[in-house]
Amino acid sequence: MFQDAVVEEMKNRGTYKDLFRNRVNLRALILVADYLIGGVKNVTYCKGVAPTSSHMTSLVELRLLIGQQFSGINAILFYAQSIFEKSNGSLSSTVPAITIGVVMLVGAFIVPIFVDRLGRKPLLLFSAGGMIIGHGLLGFSFLMDIMGKGDNISWLPITSIVVYIISYTI
């Protein structure tokens, strides 16, 4: 019985591309994304409805959330301790986690104030620009370290991570 179930599942395999190739699957993906984001309270109400502008907005939001995950935050968080140790050996191993946590916590309290005043689009552009600057400074500090000129800028990796985390939080 178990073997039959496995064989049946192997016949029905699909790829992630199938979600976007089939119009019905794409509509279901939009509805699920809209429901998860909070735009639709009752999914059965939208059954069979063609994608509307609110669904397209939700799809844009979903793309932005996916893009945010591909921006490199996981690499920054994973290697933060190594970067902090490389920049200044006198710091303890808990300082990176505490610094990143404090920066993210402060950002979580400050950002909603600016969202109401400035709007989402300027903050999104500012966030993307800040993340680019943070990555660029971090890359520059690594380049200077490879060239043997990184002794005078040991503060730059920490600063670049803080700039990146602040921009990411926005």
Image (spheres, grey):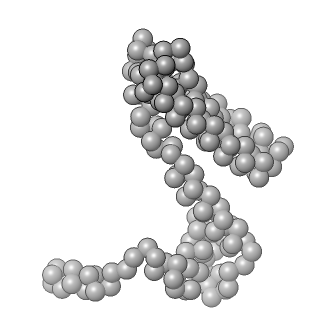
- Work out whether residue 85 can be spotted: yes
144 vs 116, nearest the viewer: 144
Whether 70 is drawn above or below 52: the answer is above
Residue pictured at 84% horizontal, 43% vertical: 117
Q: Residue 159 falls in which quadrant of the image?
A: top right
**Percent position of residue 48, x then y:** 62, 88
158 vs 64, nearest the viewer: 158
Say whether residue 59 is left or right of residue 11.
Answer: right
Say whether residue 85 is left or right of residue 12.
Answer: right
Whether 85 is drawn above or below 108: the answer is above
Q: Quadrant of the C terminus?
A: top right
**Percent position of residue 7, x then y:** 21, 84
**Percent position of residue 146, x then y:** 43, 27
Q: In which quarter of the image is the N terminus?
A: bottom left
**Percent position of residue 26, x then y:** 56, 79
Residue pictured at 45% horizontal, 16% vertical: 88
- Work out whether residue 169 can be spotted: no
Point out the residue furthest to the top here. Answer: 90
